[in-house]
Amino acid sequence: MPRNVTEQLIRLAKVRLVTEQVVQKLRSDARDNRDRILEVAREAFAVEGLDVPMREVARRAEVGVATLYRRFPTKEALLTAAFAEQMAVCIAIVDEGLTVGDPWEGFCLVVEKLLVVHALDRGFARALTSQYPRIFDFADGRDRTMRALLKLMARAKAAGDLRKDVVLEDLVLAMMANEGIRADSPDMRVAASRRFAALMIQSFRARPTPTPLPPAVRLPLFIRG
């Protein structure tokens, strides 16, 4: 093979190698940007709720607004991706509750675990009880969770353990109230949520049987003298 042809082939191989390296670097950067955006969004929504602007998410993630919108064209798309893991956890919780042989125990397990998930993530809690689930894609997951809750409630009522007048909206109301828990640490929020869940469960029971509550948690109280 003539030398000039060999040199051309070598140069072409080098160009291909550099091109592949550049493409891989761009893909890696894109993944890193996406991961960073989602991490920032989860933290912002969990602490401050759903009203954090897209521009602010981009600023905290240290990416351009255009980059953010290329990854997530709408806020609904960002919310869907940010809460996908939490939604999967909720579905797993209600599925677990349905496998419990005792209907009341399954219902109690689900109420306690769901409230803990919501206590740790204000953004997710608000998403489940706001207009957003009617818009973005995890509406299917939310609807599946709600249908499973209805099934759990029907089983517990048929067993005579859940009050006949308890409706799904009562559970949503409990979630909304639970979302308002303010504590100094995640562990304290979880402890407060479990105590609140115990209070709710006792109020839902058809044949109230007072049982010891989980330990109380010191929360910030605003008392005017």
Image: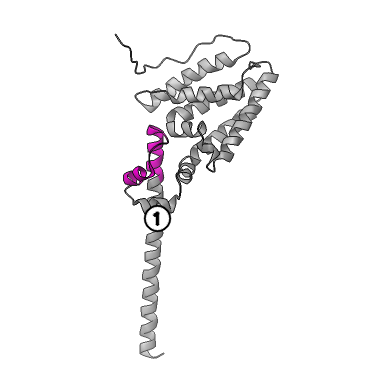
At 34% across and 52% down in the image, what residue appears? 64
**Is 184 situated above or below 11?**
above
Q: Is residue 8 left or right of residue 198?
A: left
Nearer to me, 124 or 225: 225
The percent coordinates of residue 108 (x first, y second) are 57, 22
Asked whether residue 190 appears in the rendered view, the answer is: yes
Looking at the rendered structure, the kind of residue marked 1 is Ala
The percent coordinates of residue 173 (x first, y second) are 52, 23
The percent coordinates of residue 220 (x first, y second) are 34, 18
**Which picture quadrant has residue 9?**
bottom left
Asked whether residue 100 appears in the rendered view, the answer is: no
Q: Is residue 142 left or right of residue 48?
A: right
Looking at the rendering, in which quadrant would you find the N terminus?
Answer: bottom left
Q: What's the magenta region?
A: 38-61
Residue that carries the numbered disc 1 in the rendered image: 30
Nearer to me, 16 or 157: 157
Nearer to me, 75 or 161: 75
Q: Is residue 216 left or right of residue 60?
A: right
At 39% across and 25% down in the image, what residue appears? 187
Q: Residues within 10 Å of mark 1 (few under 14, many from 20)?
A: some
**Is 16 situated above or below 105?**
below
The percent coordinates of residue 148 (x first, y second) are 63, 31
Looking at the rendering, in which quadrant would you find the C terminus?
Answer: top left
Count of labels in the image: 1
Asked if the magenta segment contains residue 59, the reply would be yes
Q: Main secondary structure of the magenta part?
A: helix
